[in-house]
Each structure stands twice: as structure tokens, then as C-alpha cells.
Amino acid sequence: MAHVDAQNEEAQVALEVVLADGPQYDTFEGPEKLLEVWFGPMDDEQIDGTTKSGLRTVARAVWDEMLSLVKCQVLNVISNEHFDAYLLSESSMFVWNGRLILKTCGTTTLLKAVPMLVKVANGVGLDLITQLFYSRKRFLFPEKQIVPHGSFSHEVQYLDELFDNGSAYVMGKLNDEHWYLYMTEPPAPSITRKTSTPLPSDKTLEVLMGDLHPSAVKPFFKTSGFSAKEASKAAGIAEIFPDAIIDDFAFDPCGYSCNAIIGKHYFTIHVTPQESCSFASFETNVVLGDYNELLRKVAAIFKPGTLSATLFSNEPVDSMFHSTNQFDLEGYTKTEKIFYQFPIYNLLFVAQKETTRSLRKSSTACAEVPVVAQSPRPSTSVTSALLASSS
């Protein structure tokens, strides 16, 4: 049974302050910065185990202090025996015993949290980073970002000053939709794991959608008269995983966020409905054999003009053709299909555009400073394969 920490007046006041200092209504940066860090050494069963330890023993005040560096606030928290899901003024944070995910939008300074996060983890006996991932799609308004997020080159430089085993990648066309990734190389399994048993299945799907259809975003404006729960039902979000426990929030005058708990797994959705910068993201670690049905559900809710999906998986891939086919969407044309094979994880990136009608507007995204170089210590064990761009 999930525990809900009810929203309070202090959180609402803090949100008003954050929004007052945030970007203008018609130029909000919906695409999120996403950080995921795994700590150790810790048994696989202990990372999301039912006995609280490690990061889940950290006091709420400590997380509040860390998030203040990012320039966001906690709106609400729901928990079960496996993890805690924090709904933020700018997106979400998820905390397990040995893992943390932080996802923030707008002009937040997410990477400013990394040094404190490492210090906090060390304080609860987690003195080893087994894997770190930082990713995002290209910004719509990069000129509005705050250091170190002015460009991916700046972000890579910042992370390289903290870690000496990181590598940087770009998926997709630099003059069109693309997605950035920075990740550290994992230490030897003998250092990070206390057992030699096979790794449990781990998959993370992220779907990033732009140019949302006007009819799809109506529930996410206050003028619709919907509460957060009503917006979840009207849009169809409540039916994605009917058994999920959903913590949702409707922003004023517009915008929507939710976290959901499904046993050991989560999903999270964030919506920027303004026509000039419409965007929605969906992310989940629910392990499925095929993600076609789930992707169709999500696309049907938001009716995006552009869509990119990334799938991280530690399961072996028998066929890259089959892997990309699980992202088939009727009425869409694949413009990019990219597959990377890393030491532990495989990464699939697929970008698509709606073909049943012309895009409602051209992209207003500004160019970022190009990446001059990747990490000074790129992985020599990484191979990549660029698949045919036609669907």
C-alpha cells in the first residue's frame, strides 16, 4: 500500500515562488534533464528491497537542501515498500536504497546536485558509483539555460571535472531532433556486486513528444475545469497501467505532472501544453517483452507531431530489426534508428514524425554550441550500429 504525504501550504507557497521566477508562459522548456545514479556496493535484492537502507534513510530536509541547488521544490511524496516517488515543481525524483533518478525541466540546474548527492550517498555507506547516466533531448530555448546547462559541451565539461571515466554521445541529426547522453563506465562486477548470479532484468523506456495536438492538451489547462485526478482520467493517463497508484498535479494556468507506482516499478509523465512550446514526456522502468502497445497508448493520449523513444536494457538483443520494430506507430515515419551496445546495457534510439498530415508548426529550437569532443577517455569497448533511416 502506498503512503501519500499530502500536499501542504508551505509547498504551495514555494511553488508560487519558483513559478514566479521561472521562464515566461509561452517559452517554457518542457524537455527535461535526466540523471540516474546507481550506488554500491549493494546486493541486487537490496537496491529495491523492502527494508529501508542507504538513500531511503536520508532525511527529507537533506533532499530539500539538494533540490534547492537545482532550483525546484517537493510538491508531494508517495511511497511503497520499494521506493519513494517525489513529485517536484519541475518534474520528479525517485529514490531507492541504492539508486536515485532526478528529472527536471525548465531552467533548473540539475547537475549542481551531483556533488551533494555523492556526499549524501557516502554518508550512508554508499561510497561507490556503479553507474551514472545523464541525458536530455536538445533544448527548445538553450539561450535561457543557466550554467552549466548552456550547451551539452558545457555539461560534459562539468561532469568530466567530477568523473574520470565518463563518455559522451549524441543520437540523431544535429540539425534536427537529437538526444544527448553522458554515462560513466561501470567498475568490474567483482567490485560492485556481492553475488555472481545473473543481473535481474532492467529496462527504462523514455518517450519524448513535441508538437502536441491541440485537442490532446485541453485537459491540462485550468480553463478545462478539471482537477488533476479528472485530467488524468479525461486524458487516458489513468488507463495506461490501471493498477498504478498515481500522484498527479495540475499547474495554474496550465501544465501537468504525475508519478505512479506499480509495485517495484514507476512511470512518470510531464506535460507542457502551450502551443508555442508543447511537449510531453513519458518514462517507465516496467519490464515488457515488447513496447509497441504501451507506445501506442502513450502516443494516442498526446497525438504528437514528433516523437523520439529511447530504451535502455540489460537484456541481450537477438535482432536489431526486431528491437526497432517494437516502436512501430501507424501514421508515423521513422527518421532515425540507432543502436548502441555498451558493456552492460544496450541503447535503442528511434525518432519519428507524423506522416498523416503536415506538422502543425516548424521547430523553434535554437542551435546549441556543437560538441567539440567527447570525453577524453571514451570507452573502447563500445560499438554502435546506425540502421537504415527508412521505416
Image: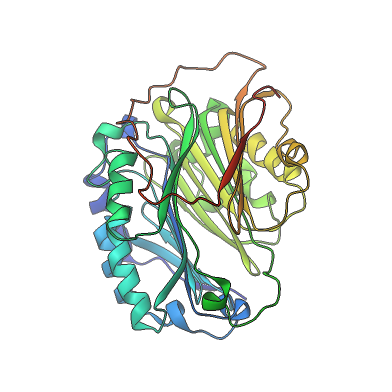
Judge whether 137 appears above or below 290 on screen: above
The quarter of the image holding the N terminus is bottom right
Q: Is residue 356 visible?
A: yes
Judge whether 316 appears above or below 7 on screen: above
Q: Position of residue 157 (x, y in %)?
A: 28, 48
Question: Is 320 or 4 nearer to us in this picture?
Answer: 320
Q: Is residue 63 visible?
A: no
- What residue is at 34 percent from the left and 60 percent from the top? 163
The number of callouts visible is 0
Is residue 34 rendered to the left or right of residue 299?
A: left
Q: Residue furthest front?
A: 380
Judge whether 172 appears above or below 243 on screen: above
Judge whether 140 appears above or below 231 on screen: above
Question: Is 307 or 345 nearer to us in this picture?
Answer: 345
Is residue 325 rendered to the left or right of residue 152?
A: right
Q: Position of residue 140 (x, y in %)?
A: 37, 31
Q: Position of residue 346 (x, y in %)?
A: 62, 50
- What residue is at 77 percent from the left and 42 percent from the top? 319
Q: Position of residue 80 (x, y in %)?
A: 57, 75
